[in-house]
Amino acid sequence: MSALYGLIGRKLGHSFSEGYFNEKFKTLGIDAEYRNFELVEIQDLEEMIDLYPQMAGFNVTIPYKTSIIPFLDEVESVAAAVGAVNTVWVDEGRLLGFNTDIIGFRDSLTEFYPEGPGGNALILGNGASAKSVGYVLEHFFAFDRIDVAARNPVLGQIAIEGLSGPEFGQYRLIVNTTPVGMHPHDSLQLPLPWRNLNRNQYLFDLIYNPERTRFLQHGEAQGCKVRNGMDMLVRQADAAWEIWRNH
């Protein structure tokens, strides 16, 4: 029986992983298959595992990166500290959780953002992906301050609508972790003071489809350096494969 890998989430029509991994398996001559598994709720995970005893590992995407944790037998220390899991290794029925978003974002940002220490960074969104981004910025980059702005902010965070123009233009790095502007809703955008962006800023969008979201288009128009999420996605996928392959 060939090994089975997959991706769980609620809506996976936008997924990159299925094609990427199946092409990888074909190129490497590996007897394995990767499938998408749309789960209406995270509780459906148990039924999926029972139905596919050949399941060797799977990735996790919106909206289950946090809610999957109680269903896991063990969570790697960094993933536990962040409170988000995007990769699961299935070991004889036991589910072990990891976070390769951290690796993917860290390595992609290191290549994209060459500036020295100091300055302020802004994270847009406060979901599971924002937790991974925040961990990377805190542990691997020496910013003076890291702010989080969200549509539904919690204590210590900023309301996106409350960002002032001058303030918005002073962040050296702005990272969008929200799904706003993702295909097929390409025309959507966050209510931000775009005209205050400037050529000294770096904009990183975790979205990879479309290639240029409205967020990045506004940045380019103001002279910002921009990057979408495709490079990060490939890096986190390769890190997930290393986990499955080496266990």
Image: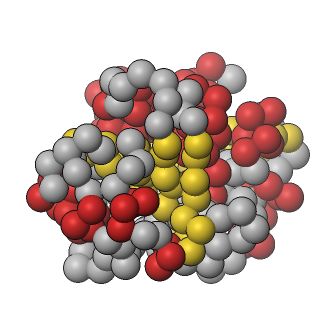
Residue 111 % position (x, y): 34, 25
Above-or-below relation of 127 to 95: below
Residue 59 % position (x, y): 57, 49
Identify the residue shown where x is 22% and y is 66%. Answer: 195
Question: Split into 4 quadrants, where in the image is the N terminus?
Answer: top right
Residue 169 % position (x, y): 34, 55
Determine which quarter of the picture holds residue 70: bottom right
| Colouring of the image | secondary structure
Question: Split into 4 quadrants, where in the image is the C terminus?
Answer: top right
Query: Foreground residue, 154 or 128?
Result: 154
Identify the residue shown where x is 32% and y is 49%. Answer: 203
Query: Foreground residue, 100 or 117?
Result: 117
Query: Foreground residue, 75 or 232?
Result: 232
Do we see residue 112 in this rendering? Answer: yes
Query: Foreground residue, 7 or 225?
Result: 225
Do we see residue 56 in this rendering? Answer: no
Residue 211 % position (x, y): 20, 56
**Residue 52 left/right relative to 141:** right
The single residue placed furthest to the front in the displayed view is: 166
Identify the residue shown where x is 80% and y is 33%. Answer: 77
Identify the residue shown where x is 49% and y is 45%. Answer: 121
**Number of numbered discs on residues:** 0
